[in-house]
Amino acid sequence: MNTHGIRYLHTLGPHGTNLESAAHEWLRRRGIDGEVALHASLETALEAVPDDGEHALVACAVYPALHTLTFGNLHRLHMVDSFVMPTHNMVLASAGAAAPRSVSTHPAPVGLVPESAEARLVLSNSQAAIDCAAGLTEGCVTTVVAAERHGLRVLRDFGSVPMVFTIHQVRAVNVADDRLESAGAWR
């Protein structure tokens, strides 16, 4: 697919998410002097992005609602690239508790929450660290980068995860014209 013209990447924040790293890596690999904007969720990012083709959404294959986001926005969201990159190390961290009873986590890595703890779902791995540091939970599943940024103690390091990241160009299209173009491509 053609990724020409993409200069602005929108993805999940706040700072320290795997998606932020992936966005910067995609720009670096292509030698693009672009910008990365961080949003509270991919859904709110899409609402804020213009349909001019210069903007793209960076997602990952395990984002819980990627299928809904993609199929609900076929008229303007077009997957144009994907790549594999290791995530930051994923960790269980706390501000003090050796065995946290409550753990903030994004829905994607919820499986890393200890069975003995109650999971509290948040919008990103970085937000999990912020909430833990603020005392909203005793622990969090987050990236090592976010844990360090917020002064948290790593209780368990799960390592990095090879992850598929996807690039979705945002551009308005005439749906009928797009179907005709796609039908021709499959012949």
Image (cartoon, rainbow, N blue to C red):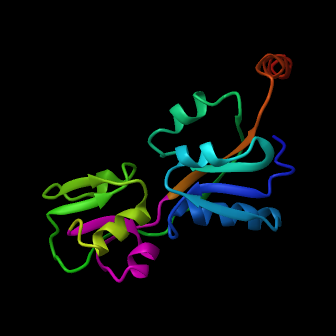
Instruction: Inspect the magenta stretch and tell me whether residue 60 lies in it.
Output: no
The answer to whether any part of residue 158 appears in the image is no
Location of residue 169 in the rendering, given as x and y in whole percent from the top left corner: 73, 43
Quadrant hosting residue 51: top right
Query: Could you say which is closer to the camera, residue 123 or residue 113?
Result: 123
Location of residue 139 in the rendering, given as x and y in whole percent from the top left corner: 24, 68
Quarter of the image with the N terminus in it: top right
> Looking at the image, which residue is at 63% across and 48% down?
48
Residue 183 sits above or below residue 73 on the image: above
Quarter of the image with the C terminus in it: top right
**Magenta segment:** 138-161
**In the drawing, does residue 93 fall left or right of residue 63?**
left
The answer to whether any part of residue 30 appears in the image is yes
Residue 53 sits above or below residue 39 on the image: above
Q: How many marks?
A: 0
> Looking at the image, which residue is at 40% across and 63% down?
127
Quadrant hosting residue 72: top right
